[in-house]
Amino acid sequence: MKKIFSLFAAVLFAGSMMAIDFTLTSASSVTKDGVTVTFAKGDGNNDPAWYDNGLRLYASNTVTVASATPITAITFNWEKQGQKAFNTATASTGSYTHPTEPGQGTWTGSATSVTFTLGATGQLQLNTFSVIVGEGGGEGGQGGGEGGQGGQVAADTLTCAQAAEQALAGKTDEVIIKGYVTEMVEEWSTYKNVSFWMADAKGGDNTFEAFRVKCETAAEAPTVGALVWVKGKLTKYTKNDVTIPETSAGGSFGILVKGEEVAPAQNLGAKTIAEFLQLKNKRDTCILTGVVSNIVSTEYGNFDLTDESGTVYVYGLLTAAGESKQFESLDVEEGDTLTLKALYNEYNGAGQVKNGIFVSVKKGEGVEGETISIEITDGVIYTDAVATDGWWQISGENDDYYVSLSNGNEITQAAGTYTVDDLDAEYSFIYDYAADAYVELASGSVKLVIAENGVVTAEGQFVGSDGNTYDLKIVYTEPEAKNTKTLVMTGLFDIEESEIEGVTYSTLTIAGSTEDESTLQLMIADATEAVGEYTEEDLYFNYSGIYDAETDEEAYIYKATIKVEAAGEGLYTLTADLLCYNNVLYKVTMALEEYTDGIESTTVAGKALKAIQNGTVVIEKSNVLYNINGQTIR
């Protein structure tokens, strides 16, 4: 059953608020949407000055913010200038919290003018800040005047219940939401964001989630009980049949009233992996030591870590300085004993380490491997007809493994022997279904033989990154129509443009399904409208295929004749003959309409198309499945 979130009927905050964002370009006073900000010498010796990297404020300078509409919150993004001391600042009225190091300074109150005065020692630098005007009101009370329009998002302040209701209804407006923090979902990390649940009453039920709102430092993060405002675009996210109303990532927030005092995060010391997983502590770190295996990303550092008590997946390993994408520089290999600082995280309900911090590594003896024979008799070989550089690839699967080999930049297939150095590592690998892990090819070679009858054989031996030796044989035979099936479908299409290195590309995407949930996905290059005739040469090979529900089989398209015609107001028909690598000729008829935001994407076709647009399509086994929020949709 889908969980239905309770929506509170009572409106606890009334009134209208407007967030105004400022980006400075000089030391002159600036006015925007009725708010004027002035920078002055004050009792100091130097006037504020503009440099290429921002506005420099000297000792005893002043910043005055004035507005006819009451100002209720100001957030300065203070920066440090060179080696000069990071100065302090005080406010003439209201409540102001100044950071002890570069970060956010937050003022709250209700005034038409407030002046900030720097301390007698040091400097500050300022580029951006935001001002909120308009009274937010109190419980059961009314707020102040309406915010002005122009230049930025202006919107009535929503309660958490109102925001949840609108998000669940499919609205995607940018709004301001006011409420209390009820639970921290993601604590601050080096990605400089936080996620938290909100409610309209302090200590209330989780009602709306602020998802990955920007937060420069850990000190600026809110705590449970804080009264906050959040600005962002409404959206909703479904996981495990639960739909969560939230803001899209990248929004902003400010603290109006501080929450509970929280003790600083601490390191709990050395723990076994079993103890770490049992603690489920998302705030404090532990020290873990184990043997590295199944490395699946050498850029971020994603792998398994095992000790005598169990195994945990590490999703990202940072340097000791907190730098990401530097895994290769750490010289960590499978079989090594690694010590890291770990913070607990969960994915699909399973505990894992997210963004562990490197401590030390002890080089191992390597992984003792075995010899594994993989023979595939129904391989696939193709040239990507629409790739800008062109390449060929031979691939296939059996019950235990999926194997892919590609010679990278050769435009046509060619017989010969290829070593690991000749292959394209991105498209040359072994996937172990039982271990749910990718095996990189460390050394070895493959011989490609093309017979006169068109049969292609790839045969060779490789040593994998798991230490095993793989004897491979893949045989490809040109597909033929040994069976014919008729599919009647309904579907959606969408046309999107993208720009790569100054060149604009237009792509037509079609996704449809039958009543028994057989599905067809087509991605057509350089199509500016749906109506037209297309062949296999127009298709993006990796993103075009059929799932046959009757046989629970997936297949790429080998040959295709496709025709799309207009069939009335907003309606179209698709007819196609598709010869696939499973030796089946599919004769497809599809009723089509254009995808719009108003169409509820609960159908198979709708989910598939949405997945394509969101970039969440993944390749599994021999064809395309749709992975949406962790759920595989055929």
Image (spheres, rainbow, N blue to C red):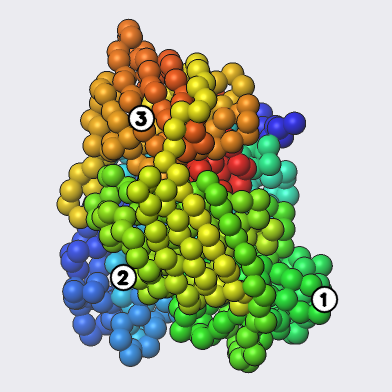
Quarter the N terminus occupies: top right
Element assignment for label 1: loop
Amino acid bearing label 2: Leu
Determine the residue positioned at 42% across, 48% down.
455
- Mark 2 or mark 1: name the one nearer the start of the chain: 2
Amino acid bearing label 1: Ser
Determine the residue positioned at 31% across, 58% down.
414
Quarter the C terminus occupies: top right
Element assignment for label 3: strand
Which label was assigned to residue 447? none
Answer above or below: position of 386 versus 368.
Answer: above
Q: Nearer the viewer, mark 2 or mark 1?
A: 1
In space, the residues marked 2 and 1 are separated at their CA atoms by 51 Å
- What percent of the width, then of the height, locates residue 506? 25, 38
Which label was assigned to residue 309? 1
- What percent of the width, then of the height, locates residue 576? 38, 22
- Mark 3 or mark 2: name the one nearer the start of the chain: 2
